[in-house]
Amino acid sequence: MRFYGTMRVNARGHLEIGGVDSVDLAKRFGTPLYVYDVELIRNRAKSFLKAFRTMGVEGQVSYASKAFSSIAILQLVHQEGLGIDVVSGGELYTAMKAGFPPEKIHFHGNNKSPEEIRMALDYQIGCFIVDNFYELELLHRLCEERSRKVNIQIRISPGIEAHTHHYIITGQEDSKFGFDLGSGQAEEALKRALSLPLYNVQGFHFHIGSQIFDTKAYRLAVKKIYQHLALWKEKYAYEPAVLNLGGGFGIRYTQDDHPLPVEKYVEAIVGEVKKEVEERGLSFPKIWLEPGRSIVGDAGVTLYSVGSMKEVPNIRRYVAVDGGMSDNIRPALYEAKYEAVVANRVLEPRDRVVSIAGKCCESGDMLIWDLPVPDLQSGDILAVFSTGAYGYSMASNYNRLPRPAVVFVENGEARLVVKRETYEDLVKNDLPLTAYTNI
Ligand SMILES: Cc1ncc(COP(=O)(O)O)c(C=O)c1O
Ligand SMILES: N[C@@H](CCCC[NH3+])C(=O)O
């Protein structure tokens, strides 16, 4: 097992994160528990910003808050100088509750409701990423209603298939997101947007997918869009002030993943844009990125307590933990792979192989197949790595399991940032049959 960030093994042979013993964390806050290495999050945010500075270009880095949204994480990324992207009224509300400056928020989504749009207009957020013709008209109508002019970016689907799980590619032609580039939809969207007086068309956005390990698809997408930008300058005298390339930068879940340092993505993207604008005599736009997973993904670790075990003779040993698909749906949804250690016995030889089952009533609720471990006992603490992105944010109350607590650790201190849900939380919106029939 390769440790990273502030993780290490302490003198008790326990996994330590942010200078705090993870076994103590499990005792103090209970399990399952999401633990975030704050220093690692800060460093990831800094690396993106530094990469732009090193390249000598203006960049905006907006954390994709769908990866993990809570008041504390948004305050943390704000401290580090990032903007954010939100995709729903709920994410926007969380950002406003966190005191996030509205001008540094931009709003994504392929089906923003009129209520969500009005809310964003009233908060005076920085930019709307317009996804489709319906929204192009709707947003403008609501701008008229509120007498407000807004910044927009046009989301393009560039027709690129990035090499990743087919559920998380988004830039291909046959996609629910954005205006298709090849068929002329994107041009039509630009033409219409330019004719609408309450729009300031900042530029274009694309996001080609998630958990991408090379720079090829980004470079290709830049190349593709510039073929059109040169033409659009001639036809509409329009050049984008912003080119937003979304997120998608891969992280390490297991030893088979070999992510690039974030600087490499920034270098490749900036390099490609520079080449294109120089060749075509266009002006250099401000480049925006929207990393989610690469900011918080490997900074998150989930701690579970080991409970029951079952041996299927000559086949497999199942070890069940006190969480599962309710706090991490990714193995069931994407066949996502994870690595883990026994946090209270990290240095012991890992001479057994077991499969880690969740506690939900689904055969598919398996967190890790074939994990090497020491001889496990009920009560051991299992630490699953790289759960920081799309773990808590995709958690559910399936089987009426309360969602875990979330703790930030830094410099030897632990801070509770999301309370564990209670059974009372689970029923607080339920109404008895009598109330229901009276509505
Ligand atoms: C529009 C957009 N931007 C940014 C992201 C963040 O992606 P990632 O977490 O892979 O960096 C996503 C999610 O895939 C997205 O849909
Ligand atoms: N939720 C996904 C990725 C999709 C991101 C949102 N466009 C994951 O866990 O990997």
Image (spheres, helix red, strand yellow):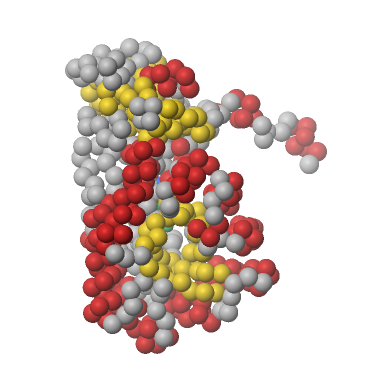
Q: Position of residue 157 (x, y in %)?
A: 38, 66
Residue name at image x 28 percent, y 20 percent: 10
Q: Position of residue 330 (x, y in %)?
A: 38, 39
Q: Position of residue 340 (x, y in %)?
A: 29, 28
Closest to the observer, 88 or 367: 88
Query: Is 85 situated above or below 419?
Result: below
Residue name at image x 35 percent, y 27 percent: 19
Query: Is 12 situated above or below 363?
Result: above
* Residue 215 visible at all: yes
Residue name at image x 37 percent, y 12 percent: 378
- Check the picture and name the quadrant holding the N terminus: top left
Left or right: 66 as drawn, with respect to 376: right
Query: Is 364 situated above or below 44?
Result: above
Left or right: 248 as drawn, with respect to 67: left
Q: Position of residue 384 (x, y in %)?
A: 34, 29
Rendering quarter of residue 327: top left
Closest to the observer, 282 or 197: 282
Rendering quarter of residue 311: top left
- Check the picture and name the quadrant holding the C terminus: top right
Residue name at image x 27 percent, y 23 percent: 9
* Residue 402 visible at all: no
Closest to the observer, 37 or 206: 37
Left or right: 169 as drawn, with respect to 155: left
Closest to the observer, 209 or 175: 209
